């Protein structure tokens, strides 16, 4: 069964499709339980799952992304010096992030990079807040330690300055990273 309809969202029109699938009963029960726990409709949960898959999951194996528990990330980063962290961000991180973002978005500009970056933070279970006035302001809450913040500070400065031609201001703490730039 296939049916198209339009639903307005924020003054834009988003097309939806009604589709019928056969789903294993045990999976369906788990999806229903998860939607109840999250207090969202089953439809919303399934759309979130499918969105995450098409925007991120489909690319993970292709670009070499592996899941890693937070305590391991903290331990790895905390055992490095600040100089090693900054060197890794500029020497390896910048090129890896550029290549992955390019592969997933097919272009590198401010908008495509930020869209990729926000998706990366969300799928990594990190909180991110974006406010746009005459400038962009992003706040990331991560609880991964000072060196993780330092790595991303050096990485973002390198990407914005060298690749995107934008000046960026970054403030870090052991649990947050805040960066701003003028559009």
Image (cartoon, rainbow, N blue to C red):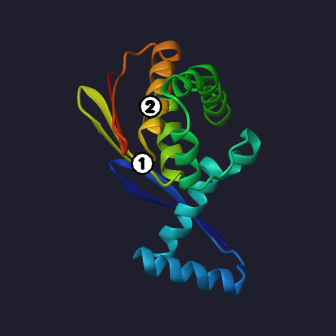
The residue labelled by disc 1 is: 142
**Structural crowding at the residue carrying mark 2, measured as other residues with C-alpha within 10 Å and reported as few (<14), some (14–19) or many (≥20):** many
Q: Residue most toward the left?
A: 133
Of the image marks 2 and 1, the number of the one nearer the N terminus: 1
Picture layout, residue 100 above or below residue 38: above
Picture layout, residue 36 above or below residue 167: below
| Residue 158 in the figure: left or right of residue 106 | left
x, y percentage for residue 108?
57, 24
Q: Residue most toward the right?
A: 62
Q: Quadrant of residue 50?
A: bottom right
Near-viewer residue (77 or 177): 77
x, y percentage for residue 51?
57, 56
Near-viewer residue (76 or 139): 76
x, y percentage for residue 152?
47, 32
| Residue 61 in the figure: left or right of residue 70 | right
| Residue 110 in the figure: left or right of residue 4 | left
Q: Residue at the spot x=65%, y=52% of the render?
A: 67
Image quarter hosting the N terminus? bottom right
Q: Residue at the spot x=50%, y=19% of the render?
A: 158
Image quarter hosting the C terminus? top left
The residue labelled by disc 2 is: 150
Near-viewer residue (163 or 84): 84
Q: Residue at the spot x=68%, y=44% of the render?
A: 65
Q: Secondary structure at mark 1?
A: loop
x, y percentage for residue 4?
56, 62
Q: How many marks?
A: 2
Near-viewer residue (139 or 85): 85
Q: Secondary structure at mark 2?
A: helix
């Amino acid at each position: 069964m296939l049916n198209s309809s339009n639903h307005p969202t924020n003054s834009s029109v988003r097309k939806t499709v009604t589709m019928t699938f056969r789903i294993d009963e045990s999976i369906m029960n788990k999806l229903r339980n998860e939607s109840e726990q999250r207090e969202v409709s089953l439809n919303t949960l399934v759309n979130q799952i499918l969105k995450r898959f098409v925007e991120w999951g489909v690319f993970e194996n292709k670009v070499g992304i592996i899941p890693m528990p937070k305590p391991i990330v903290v331990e790895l980063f905390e055992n490095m010096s600040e100089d090693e962290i900054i060197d890794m961000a500029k020497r390896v991180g910048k090129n890896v992030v550029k290549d992955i973002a390019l592969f997933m978005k097919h272009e590198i500009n401010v908008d495509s990079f930020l869209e990729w970056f926000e998706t990366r933070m969300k799928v990594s279970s990190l909180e991110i807040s974006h406010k746009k006035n005459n400038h962009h302001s992003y706040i990331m809450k991560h609880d991964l330690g000072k060196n993780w913040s330092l790595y991303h500070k050096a990485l973002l400065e390198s990407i914005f300055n060298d690749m995107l031609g934008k000046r960026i201001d970054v403030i870090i703490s052991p649990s947050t990273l805040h960066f701003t730039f003028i559009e």
